[in-house]
Amino acid sequence: MPSFANYPSLKDRSVFVSGGGSGIGASIVEHFAAQGSKVGFVDIDEKASAEVAKKTGALFLKCDIRDVKAYQAAIAEVARQHGDITVLINNAARDDRHDLADVTPEFFDERMAVNLRHVYFAIQAVVPGMKKAGGGSIVNFSSISYHTMSPRLSVYQAAKSAVIGMTRGLARDFGTDKIRLNSITPGWIMTQRQIDLWLTPEAEADLLKAQVLKEKVYPADIARMALFLASDDARLISAQNFAVDGGRM
């Protein structure tokens, strides 16, 4: 059995995770809680999130990240209860398939709100506290889908590619404040949603053929990268993107 790292610098650190109720986000909440961090998270799935909160002791606030005012208020509440947030994990996203001919301006704007806009305004909300605390780590999530040119995901891909540009620009802006920004590009991660909707024997065979490591990638593999980037072990890493994809890109 592999033995994974413990990061003393994460103990008692105030951590905020978006979309922490299931999939990658739930694994991230669990991993930070196991490090002794004070974790707060938001999600719209109240039932699943309550189970994560019970399992981990994390603080759950139900919130729709598309509502910027309510979202920033939720972030402020986590900071009030746990102290200034010094680790922000911008995980929440939605990868529903769509065709160009069917995309309306309303759909486009809503997809940007759920895949890109909330990232920016969460960063806006935590930066003052990070400055006061003497620094922090922000981890944003991109997607392998725009590298692999996955079909029927163009709006999602536009948002997820923009995340990397945003990350690098803001890393420059706040480097002097010891606020580090990095992005993670997950490969095809075996969340329950992905397994239920899209994993077929044929798709799995194609995936493993494309990867240099012949194993499927799971949420815990992403969570462990987030732990490292949040920790003081990564203190001089910023403005970088890390693919966790079994060697597919």
Image (cartoon, rainbow, N blue to C red):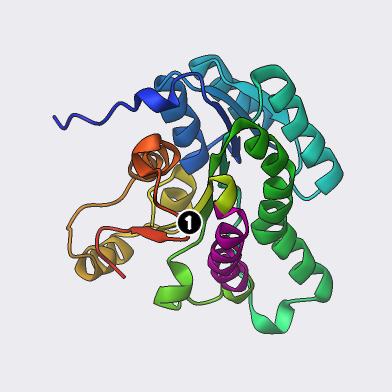
Horizontal arrangement in the rendering, residue 242 relative to residue 142 (left or right): left
Eyeballing the image, is 19 above or below 169? above
Residue 54 picture location, percent across and down: 55, 15
Q: Is residue 157 inside the magenta stretch?
A: yes
Where is residue 207 shown, x and y percent of the image?
A: 28, 65
Which quarter of the rendered picture does the C terminus lie within?
Answer: bottom left
Residue 36: name its quadrant: top left
**Is residue 148 found left or right of 61 in the rendered image?**
left
- Res 152 seen here: yes
31 or 181: nearer the eye?
Answer: 181
Q: Position of residue 196 (x, y in %)?
A: 45, 49
Point 55% across, 58% down: residue: 171
Give the residue displayed 28% in from the left and 67% down from the top.
248
Give the extent of the magenta segment: 156-175
Asked where in the image residue 2 lies, by quadrant, the reply is top left
- Mark 1: few/some/many CA within 10 Å (<14, 14-19, 20+): many
Q: Mark 1 points at which residue?
A: 183
- Inspect the magenta stretch and tell me whether residue 212 lies in it: no
Q: Residue at x 45, y 55 (%)?
A: 238
What type is the residue that disc 1 sits on?
Ser
Could you tell me if residue 187 is visible in this image?
A: no
Q: Residue furthest bottom?
A: 101
Task: Tell me the element at label 1.
Answer: strand
State the image coordinates of residue 210 (x, y, percent, origin top left): 24, 70
